[in-house]
Image (cartoon, rainbow, N blue to C red):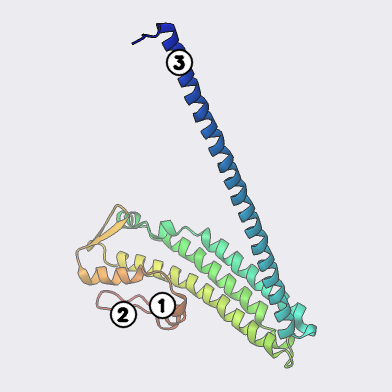
Amino acid sequence: MKVLPQEDKERIRSARDEARRLRVADDIALTDRKFRRLERGILWFFAILLVALSACLFWNVSLRGERARMRYRPETYAAFTNLVSMASAIETEHADAMGRMDFDLLKNYALLERSDDFRPFQDEIARARAVVLYSREETRMLFKELYALFPPDSINERHDAQKIYGELMTVIDVSEERVDAAEKALLLLLANKGRWHAKKGTVEFTDNALKAEFDSLGQDPDEDTARWRKDFGAIESNVIEVPSH
C-alpha cells in the first residue's frame, strides 16, 4: 500500500476543509435568503393587515357618524355632539384630579397608629370631596338646560343626553364611594386604637368582627352599587357606626 507524503495529506485535508467551509457558507447564505424572504413576507402581511384594519376603522367611524346623523335631527346634531365632547372633557378632568389625590396617605395606617393628629387625613379627604363636588356641579350645569337645548322633536338627543348624564354621574359616584370608604376605614381604626396593629402596609386585628368590618371597606368601588351606597351606605354594626355623607 502506497503511503502518501505528509504534504499531500495536508493538501487533501485542506481541500476537504475548504469544501466543507464553502458548503457551510452556502447553507448559511441560503438560510439567510430564506429568512429575508420570510421577513419580507411577514412585513407585507402586517402592512396589509394594518391597511385592512385602518380601512375597517375608518368605515366603522364613518358608519357610526352616518348612523348618528340619521338618529339625530340636523337642527340639533351639532349641539348634541358638542354636549358629548364637553361631557367627555369633564370626565377626563375628573379622572386627572382624582389621580392627583394622595390615596397612599389615606392608607398609611402606620402613621395613623403612631400619631394623634388626624388633620392630614381630614385635609386630603376634604380635597377629594371638593373634586367630587366640583365635577358633580359641572355635570349638572352642563345638562341642566337639556330640554331647552333639545326641543320635543329631538327625542333621541334628549334620551341619549340623559343616558350620558347618568353614566357620568355614576363615574363621579364611584369616586365619592372610594373617598367614603377610605374615610370610614380611617375612622373605624381611629375609634378602635389598641385593637389593631399596622405591619408592612397591612393591618392586623385582635378582633375578628373589627377585621370583617375593615375588610368590607377595602372592596373596590363598583359602578353598579355606588348609587345604593351613596343613598343607604351607613356602616351599622356592633363595632362602630360611621354615618354616610
Nearer-the-camera pick, 152 or 51: 51
Instruction: Label 2, secondary structure: give it.
Output: loop
Nearer-the-camera pick, 84 or 217: 84
| x, y percent for residue 218 | 35, 67
The residue labelled by disc 1 is 244
Q: Neighbour class for label 2 at 10 Å: few (<14), some, many (≥20)? A: few
| x, y percent for residue 230 | 45, 79
Q: Which mark is residue 12?
A: 3
Outermost residue, bottom side: 152
Q: CA distance from mark 1 to mark 2?
A: 10 Å
The residue labelled by disc 2 is 236
- Position of 166 with respect to 107 (left or right) is right
Q: Given this view, does label 1 or label 3 mark the residue nearer the observer?
A: 3
Q: Which badge, 1 or 3, comes first in the chain's sequence?
A: 3
Residue 112: image quadrant is bottom left
| x, y percent for residue 94 | 57, 66
